[in-house]
Amino acid sequence: MIEVKGVSHDMRGQAILRDVSLSLPRGGVTALIGPNGAGKSTLLSLIARLQRLQRGRITVDDLTVGACADRDLARLLAIMPQSSAISARLRVGELVGMGRYPWHGGRPGAADHAAVEAALAQFDLTGLRQRFLDEISGGQRQRALVAMACAQGTDYLLLDEPLNNLDIAASRQLMALLRVMARDQGKSVVIVLHDINYAAGFADRVIALAGGRIVADGPPTQVITPCLLSGVFSTDARISVIDGRPVVVV
Amino acid sequence: MIDRFVLLFGLLILSILGFMTLGAEGSWSFLLPFRGAKLAALMLVGCCLATATVLFQTITGNRILTPSVMGFDALYVLVLTALVFGLGAAGYAALPVPLLFALNMGVMTGAGLLLFALLMRGGRGDMVKLVLTGIVLGLLIRAVTTFLQRMIDPSEFQTIQSASFARFTFVDRRLLAATALAALPALALAWRMRFRLDVLALGTEAATGLGEPPRRGQRQALVLICVLVAAATALAGPVSTGFAGPSSFFGLVVVSLAHLVTPSPRHAVLLPSAALIACIVLIGGQTVMERLLHLATPLPVVIELLGGLLFLFLLLRKAQG
């Protein structure tokens, strides 16, 4: 369970998050939505200790973020940041292999190789494994980064806008895969999404943030309403219900 | 990859053999320890500078930087100039060698650590700011050095000039031992960091996510860099610079060659490969210059020239790509 209690965050005097509290029980896909600058990415990077916590407390299972050993947290929680500028010149296979580092500390064993193979196969990257990251398309790169986070083999998986650069087929495939992982392997997936329709289609729970506060929290059908679109996103797009799930008509 | 290493080892042994045997006149009981000490000094300096440059490039995430950009070599020349200025050339020459070494080593390590401590204290380990500040400080140090040199007696200036290029002509045995004592543990620690360096090379966020806090790794690497560069410079003088250029290209040449000969993102490959190439360049270069061409030009001058060209090439290629 990820427990966020009273977290506030400032950046140069600007409040990014204001007293956010939420708890994410194990299992399921949780989508964070909200307009630009709502604090979604900041919340995610605070949970994954990419930024230092200023006020409040975050725990992941029995580990307290900021106080626990980095290696322990890396075995429990993996993050794919929004702008993963990988500075080293790596092949796809090598990048995905780095995901196993928290487990082997540099000396991969048979189990690590198997996990990397599985992740490569899952994300359809086996044919690209020998290619360098700067030689493949943005979408393929994105898939490689998600595969790296999956190879880390953690119970919690945080993904910041993983659908960037992905075409519709790859986006649906990735979301479906995350659902399967959450259902069959009991993983907890927290994902920042821009496209509300993907949140409605694939998430079990949707949390909407605006102005650094949580403004709505619940199953997609309850959260994604015309009221949310006009109040939070300031747009008057229509919502129609197809097959029992809300769809934003853009 | 293995065959590349075999090739490098072969080249190293060849250059060592050439260095030890070519033009050998006189008794071996004299030549062996004499040339042996020089050989050890060359290898030590090569390993130190190659390792320091690899570490520096990894933590800055930049393949065209070397530690001497930060003005390490300049600090050595400043200490030298200040001593000659204060004591006079005769006084400087009378200084005991171990004292001079300890002084150089202490000032360089201390100043490097001070710079890093000051800059890293501000919370965020901003590497770009660190490097830029280092460059500016390097310029300041060089300016002060030049100012002191203007005020020195021209004949005393000769002392500085001859001492501020790397010299491998004569090696003090005690100096060699002291350098090894400082450098070998640092080299061993760098080798122990090899897997962590692989992760640090991915960038700040990826490294954090994998449980390898970048700030701690950067700090440790910077300490090692300070010790390695200080040890190499205190033993041999700055490899390149002198008064000519703003940066030393030796590390750059060596690490670029290592990337070319043994292309791998793993530091377990890069560190030994760069060290081997550094030894080959220094020993082989010294052999060719001294024994085959009978040139009096110091090796660093040649390295500087070739390194400058390589630096330009790397910059231009990066600008195009």
Image (cartoon, coloured by chain):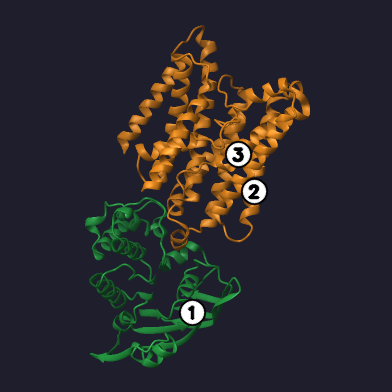
Q: Which residue bears the numbered disc 1?
A: A3
- Type of amino acid at the residue the image marks with label 3: Phe
The answer to whether residue A154 is left or right of residue B32 is left
For chain B, give the colour: orange
> Judging from the image, what is the letter of the chain drawn in green?
A
Can you say which quadrant of the picture contains the C terminus of chain A?
Answer: bottom left
Element on which disc 1 rests: strand
Q: Position of residue A232 (x, y in %)?
A: 44, 87
A91 in relation to B211, above or below = above
Question: Is the residue marked by circle 3 packed among few (<14), some (14-19), or many (20+) residues within 10 Å?
Answer: many
Label 2, label 3: how far apart the Cα atoms are: 11 Å
The answer to whether residue A38 is left or right of residue B133 is left
Q: Nearer the viewer, residue A75 or A35?
A: A35
Q: Which residue bears the numbered disc 3?
A: B72
Task: Report which quarter residue A54 is drawn in.
Answer: bottom right
Q: Chain of mark 2?
A: B
Q: Are the residues flagged by discs 3 and 1 from a single subunit?
A: no
Number of marks in picture? 3
The answer to whether residue A25 is left or right of residue A243 is right
- Type of amino acid at the residue the image marks with label 1: Glu
Q: Pointers 3 and 1 in contact (CB under 8 A)? A: no
Q: Chain of mark 3?
A: B
Q: Which residue bears the numbered disc 2?
A: B115
Q: Nearer the viewer, residue A66 or A160?
A: A160
